[in-house]
Image (cartoon, helix red, strand yellow):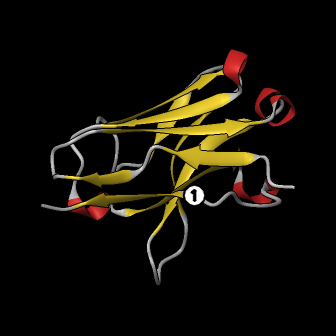
Amino acid sequence: QVQLVESGGGLVQPGGSLRLSCVTSETILNHNNMGWYRQVPGKQRELVAFIMMIGSTTYADSVKGRFTISRDNAHNTVYLQMNSLKPEDTAVYYCNVVPFTLVRSWGQGTQVTVSS
């Protein structure tokens, strides 16, 4: 049973902002580092940001300074605040555990489209 539900995507103009949410289980969130991945058709899924259980964060160079990942353990939710969006950020975004080798299943993802 998939226990990752992403939401918050949509269509936004370049320079705009979106906040993605990922509701998961207490078990998953409290025992794993969590990340946001994205995938475009024909390309491999890439990890764009992750947050450790202790709270430290790491970002891909392509999103550094524009995206912010956070976690709310009280609400079993991981967020991705995305600012200054670019057309190349268009993708389906997924949250999951980190590293990738620990992933067992994927949620449905949420589509982000950046276009004028």
Q: Disc 1 designates what residue?
A: 109
Q: Nearer the viewer, residue 42 or 2?
A: 2
Q: For this view, does 79 lie left or right of residue 23?
A: left
Q: Image point 36% across, 49% down: which residue?
A: 61
Crowdedness of circle 1 by 10 Å Cα count: few (<14), some, many (20+)? many
Snapshot quadrant of residue 105 = bottom right
Q: Image point 66% across, 47% down: which residue?
A: 5
Snapshot quadrant of residue 66 = top left
Snapshot quadrant of residue 73 = top right
Residue 71 against residue 10 in the figure, above or below: above
| Residue located farthest toward the top when viewing the structure as drawn | 74
Return the x and y of residue 86 as percentages of the image width and height: 22, 54
Q: Amino acid at mark 1?
A: Gly
Return the x and y of residue 87 as percentages of the image width and height: 22, 62
| Residue located farthest toward the bottom when viewing the structure as drawn | 42
- The C terminus lies in quadrant: bottom left
Count of numbered tags: 1
Residue 71 against residue 60 in the figure, above or below: above
Q: Nearer the viewer, residue 110 or 29?
A: 110
Q: Image point 42% across, 50% down: which residue?
A: 9
Q: For this view, does 54 lie left or right of residue 58?
A: right
- The N terminus lies in quadrant: bottom right
Return the x and y of residue 36 as percentages of the image width and height: 55, 47
Q: Nearer the viewer, residue 32 or 4?
A: 4
Query: Tag 1's secondary structure?
Result: loop
Return the x and y of residue 48 as percentages of the image width and height: 47, 50
